[in-house]
Amino acid sequence: MEADVTHADTARGVVLDGRYRIEEVIGHGGMSTVYRAHDDVLDRDVAVKIFPPSSEAAHTRRHQSEMHVLARLSHPGLVTLHDAGSAHAGGPGEQTYLVMELVPGPTLADHLAGGPMPTSHVARMGRQLADAMAAVHEAGVVHRDIKPANVLVVDRDAVTDEDPAAALTTGPLVKLADFGIARLADGARLTMTGTTLGTATYLSPEQAAGGEVGPATDVYALGLVLLECLTGEKAFRGTVMEVAAARLNTDPTVPESLGEQWGALLARMTRREAADRISMRQVVVELTRVLGEPTDEIPTGALPAAEAPSAGSGGTEEGAGQGRSGRSAAAVTMSLGAVPRGRSAGTRRRVPTPILVMAVALLGLTVGLMVPRGDQGVPRGDLPVVEGPLGEAIDDLARSVEP
Ligand SMILES: Nc1ncnc2c1ncn2[C@@H]1O[C@H](COP(=O)(O)OP(=O)(O)OP(=O)(O)O)[C@@H](O)[C@H]1O
């Protein structure tokens, strides 16, 4: 019988596909365990992300669809997908795994525990993330889970040094991980044992309202992440319920001390109406202005020069989320099956406010009931699956809670 790769103690030493030798756990997510592994064929270290066994064919199909999208995305600011496969293929304990570029540094969440970052560092790091995300949007995909825990810091010194000029100009400081995988398993977090629930810190208003999610959702989340990097404080604090509900009526506060440029940019990124936000490509342009650099020489990491949009061309709302194929991000999201249960392509539907309030209350209540009072904050037992619009609103909230 093949070894179980669910747990660290049984996974160590397992060789997947005859080449990926599992070594040690390097990260846990709500949906997976991430291991350092050695690729015996290419003789290099890699990261292997293993999902728990799924008995639902729909989950497996969704993982495969998402892998195909991940495979076509290439950008220095995105963690590269090398390979994918299944352990115990065809059996009841089949487990999907992804083999990725190994980024050995801490996450931005780890880094932020040390306090705010210098503004120029935030601008450069933010521009790298925005450029990567603009490429993602232009490929017709929405991440939907931008948060510090999903930003891997490539070079810790480049973020902490007072004068990291060389590192800042040569390569990406950060890489975005967890690319859209979390959204694939709609509702799975609500049924998984051992899922860590935190706060709905980076939830966009449209996610909180159960509305349609598009590229502007990522812009909002990145705005909150940048604000947190600058201030060292989360923009919204409180219980899951309070935090999720607050953003429907409240704009994040940008301290005046950050200056007019940052104030204007962050306000335009975090407008409550998604349609009023600037595009991710425009964020790249604005952060270049913040850095005092010419906007006609903005680096675009992923796209060949011939295909790269000019600095300003993607900056219009019309351009936001349109891929080179001409398909909108929302359309591709739907074709991936990444839309919450029960939604169909082309259907625009908002969850009525009373349902949202019930959803927020239920999620808050559930988290309150499930999270033990100790330091770990790890819920025990299964959370209920709720069908219909209420379930969808809860799913959206659950997907957005931060570990
Ligand atoms: N390519 C990588 N290189 C190094 N570490 C990684 C890599 N990918 C993920 N990790 C580590 O594993 C952790 C969990 O990964 P990830 O967020 O992708 O999992 P997840 O199950 O999708 O999580 P969630 O959906 O709860 O955010 C990360 O926070 C990071 O510490």
Image: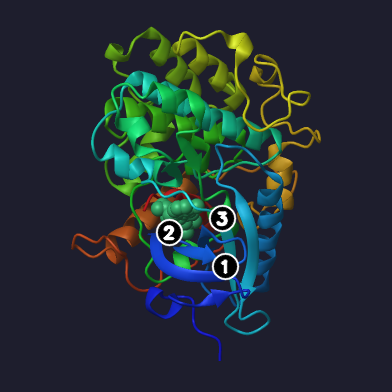
Of marks 2 and 1, which one's residue comes earlier in the chain? 2
Residue placed furthest toward the bottom: 1
Image spot of residue 62 (x, y percent): 67, 61
> In this image, 197 relative to 216: left or right?
left
Q: Which mark is residue 216?
A: none
Q: Which quadrant of the structure image shows residue 12?
A: bottom left
Label 1's element?
loop
Mark 2 and mark 1 residues within 8 Å of each other at the beta carbon: no
Q: Which mark is residue 29?
A: 2
Q: Does any atom of ligand 1 lie closer than 8 Å to the CB of label 2?
A: yes
Q: Is 260 placed above or below 70 here? A: above
Q: Which residue is mark 1?
A: 40
Q: Is 124 placed above or below 173 here? A: above
Residue drawn at 46 percent across, 75 percent down = 6
Q: Is 135 placed above or below 178 here? A: above
Q: Which quadrant of the structure image shows residue 8?
A: bottom left
Residue drawn at 28 percent across, 26 percent down = 231
Which residue type does callout 1 highlight? Asp
Image spot of residue 95 (x, y percent): 58, 74
CA gap between label 1 and label 3 equals 14 Å
Image spot of residue 355 (x, y percent): 49, 49
Frontmost residue, 175 versus 39: 39
Of marks 1 and 3, which one's residue comes earlier in the chain? 1
Label 2's element?
loop
Q: Which mark is residue 100?
A: 3
Q: How is the image coloured?
A: rainbow
> In this image, 43 relative to 348: left or right?
left
Mark 1 and mark 3 residues within 8 Å of each other at the beta carbon: no
Of marks 3 and 2, which one's residue comes earlier in the chain? 2
> In this image, 195 relative to 31: left or right?
left
